[in-house]
């Protein structure tokens, strides 16, 4: 039955969803840039990211439920650590997390029309992963933006996982949290891989869930020994994955 539904969905995917994504991304990107310049990046983020994410999720369609949002203090800045299994993770986080945050993005995304300029004006953090010194410099320059309830988000695995088990977590998020003295907010995105697996065009309607875990205090942890902190946060994120 799923195979038949998948075949029937293909015309809708190519005739509706691909054009919607192709048009909505530059539109909301330029809207973000305009609102950020005329008002401020926080307003630009709210006026562009949330409707862009919800529009594309609604039309897919992808239904999203959230568990644990009450654990977020909206006056507190966090280093948010999330798993990564699909490009649709971005829609879930932008559309349903409900707080202002900055992405850590790879440099290549600057070239996407609308998206590149929009993210730049919103203050998102571009990192050149081919140049370690430049990447470190970008992270340090961005630290001043993570204040007054604005957070920063990392996909700690660094690439798409398989949705069933987590890859090793990279250290960048944890180093920033310790440097800034900010709590880590672990979040788990579930179900997006069934909507759109990473690295494919196999889009299909489905359901996703966002699980927000208890914030993790970084007090007492040192940059030279983050292994215990990484294990604690990874265990929290992993606990939100659906049993297979």
Image (spheres, rainbow, N blue to C red):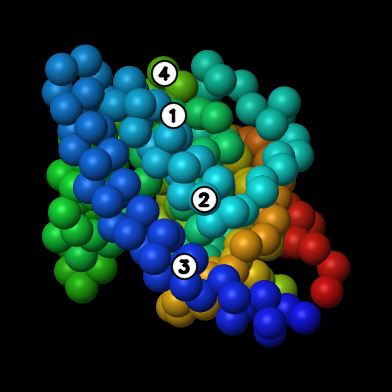
Q: Rate crowding at label 4 as few (under 14), some (14 to 19) or many (20 or more) other CA atoms within 10 Å.
A: few
Which residue position holds label 3?
Answer: 13
Residue drawn at (25%, 68%), measured in percent from left and top?
A: 129
SS at badge 2? helix
Query: Which quarter of the rendering shows the N terminus?
Result: bottom right
Closer to the eye: label 3 or 4: 3
| Residues at marks 1 and 3, CA–CA distance in whole angstroms | 30 Å
From the viewer's perspective, is 38 left or right of 92? left
Q: Nearer the viewer, mark 1 or mark 4?
A: 1
Q: Earlier in the sequence, mark 1 or mark 4?
A: 1
C-alpha separation, residue under disc 2 versus residue under disc 4? 34 Å
Q: Quadrant of residue 152?
A: top left
Rendered view: 148 above or below 3: above
Identify the secondary structure beneath mark 3.
helix
> Which numbered disc, 1 or 2, marks the residue that appears first in the sequence?
2
Q: Position of residue 109 (x, y in %)?
A: 23, 60
* Foreground disc of the pair 1, 3: 3
Q: Quick one: SS at disc 4?
A: loop
Disc 2 marks which residue? Answer: 59
Distance Cα–Cα, label 3 vs label 4: 40 Å
Disc 2 versus disc 4: nearer the observer? 2
Q: In the rendered view, tell whether residue 10 sits above or below residue 74.
A: below
CA separation, marks 3 and 2?
10 Å
Q: Nearer the viewer, residue 7 or 172?
A: 7
Task: Tell me the residue that label 1 is attached to.
Answer: 100
Using the image, determine if residue 86 lies above or below residue 223. below
Q: Earlier in the sequence, mark 1 or mark 3?
A: 3
Percent coordinates x, y for residue 148 in the rendering = 41, 18
To which residue does mark 4 refer? 148
């Amino acid at each position: 039955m799923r195979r038949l539904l998948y075949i029937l969905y293909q015309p809708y995917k190519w005739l509706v969803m691909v054009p919607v994504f192709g048009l909505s991304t530059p539109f909301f990107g330029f809207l973000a840039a305009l609102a950020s310049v005329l008002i401020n990046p926080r307003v630009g983020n709210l006026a562009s990211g949330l409707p862009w994410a919800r529009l594309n999720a609604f039309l897919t369609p992808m239904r999203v439920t959230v568990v644990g949002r009450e654990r977020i203090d909206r006056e507190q800045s966090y280093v948010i650590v999330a798993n990564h299994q699909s490009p649709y993770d971005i829609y879930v986080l932008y559309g349903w997390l409900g707080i202002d945050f900055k992405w850590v993005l790879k440099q290549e995304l600057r070239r996407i029309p609308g998206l590149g300029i929009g993210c730049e004006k919103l203050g998102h953090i571009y990192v050149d992963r081919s140049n370690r010194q430049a990447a470190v410099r970008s992270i340090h320059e961005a630290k001043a933006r993570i204040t007054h309830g604005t957070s920063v988000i990392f996909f700690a695995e660094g690439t798409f996982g398989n949705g069933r088990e987590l890859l090793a977590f990279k250290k960048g998020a944890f180093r920033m949290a310790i440097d800034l003295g900010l709590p880590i907010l672990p979040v788990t995105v579930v179900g997006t891989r069934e909507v759109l697996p990473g690295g494919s065009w196999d889009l299909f309607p489905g359901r996703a869930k966002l699980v927000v875990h208890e914030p993790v205090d970084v007090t007492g942890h040192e940059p030279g020994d983050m292994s215990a902190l990484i294990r604690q946060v990874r265990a929290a994120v992993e606990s939100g994955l659906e049993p297979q």
